[in-house]
Image: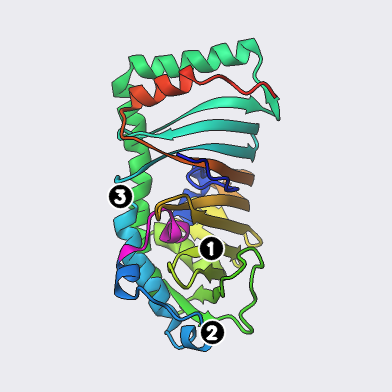
Amino acid sequence: MPHRTLKGKTTHRPAAIQILCLGFFLLFSSGPFSSICQAQTSVSANASSLLSIPPRDWVAGAVENELKAIHDKSSYLRYRMHIVDTKGDQVRDVIESKDGTVARLILRDGKPLTEEQDKAERERLNNMLRDPQGFAKHVKNSESGKKIADQLIRLMPDAMLYTYAPGQPQTGKNPGITEVVIDYVPNPKFHPPSTTAEALTGLKGRAWFDPKSRQVLRLEGNIFRGVNFGWGMLAHIYPGGQLTLEQADAGNGRWTYTHFRERITIRALMVKTLDIKTDVDAWNFQEVPLMSYQEAIQLLLNTPLPTR
């Protein structure tokens, strides 16, 4: 299977801002928008034809398909993920298994692991092998994020107002593609049905679509006003935050995040203020066969570490 070099990544999100990110970003997460592609297999590249489609239709179709894709387990990937956050600069070798995703630390601060660091990482992975119940609990916790995403995704067509961006400015990163550019702002008539959904009321931005696949190539979000959770008792997200993601086809129609960037300030429980700065990139996507998490860990452990 040839390696595909794509910058970026997607699944890593700090828990403190999952409420904000999951609802909107998972609208455009990995997985083909199958029903849209089947319903309209040939989309004219003519800009005027593209702009004749109500912008909300792009989002409604994406929601329908994302609800299928978010739980899809028909394909599995292996890739490299580069994360820069408060924990430092790390590169991980990641494998998706039928039981959940596993990863091995392979570089820290741009350097090969020391013998001590590698020993600690091997011990961590071997402990996971010996504790399937612990791994299952970890996966169950991550599944709660999918549930939140599922709930918020269903709100997206009505939570925002969508318009075509004036002049349709292109990213310049996708030669040969006339990107469809849509701006979004909160719908003033939308009443969040839950505390979690409050996150959608403070976000606005722009999305770039690939007209053929109806996938989002790039998404920008700006937190233009503060958002309270539980009247500010649980958390408060300050205005001025920025979120960016990009995604691409990792092969065989499997779309996944290739870049994620966030700059957000949050106050938790009226006590601690957190400045969250995260950059995530992934590349070297390969399709892998169906395997258990134990098999995936063994594969990671048997793979030589990079020497530079």
Mark 3, Cα crowd under 10 Å, few <14 / some 14-19 / many 20+, is some
Query: At 40% from the left edge and 68% from the top edge, which residue is drawn?
Result: 156
Q: Secondary structure at mark 3?
A: loop
Q: Is residue 178 magenta?
A: no
**Is label 3 or label 2 in front?**
2
- The picture places residue 193, in percent across and down from the top left corner, at 34, 65
Alpha-carbon span between mark 1 and mark 3: 21 Å
Residue where numbered disc 3 is placed: 71
Of labels 3 and 2, earlier in sequence is: 2
Magenta extent: 23-34
Going 56% across and 75% down the picture, which residue do you hit? Answer: 178
Residue occupying image coordinates x 63% and y 26%: 107
Q: Which residue is mark 1?
A: 217
Task: Please tell me which residue lies in front, 4 or 160.
Answer: 4
Give the alpha-carbon distance from disc 3 to disc 2, as whole Å: 33 Å
Q: Earlier in the sequence, mark 1 or mark 3?
A: 3
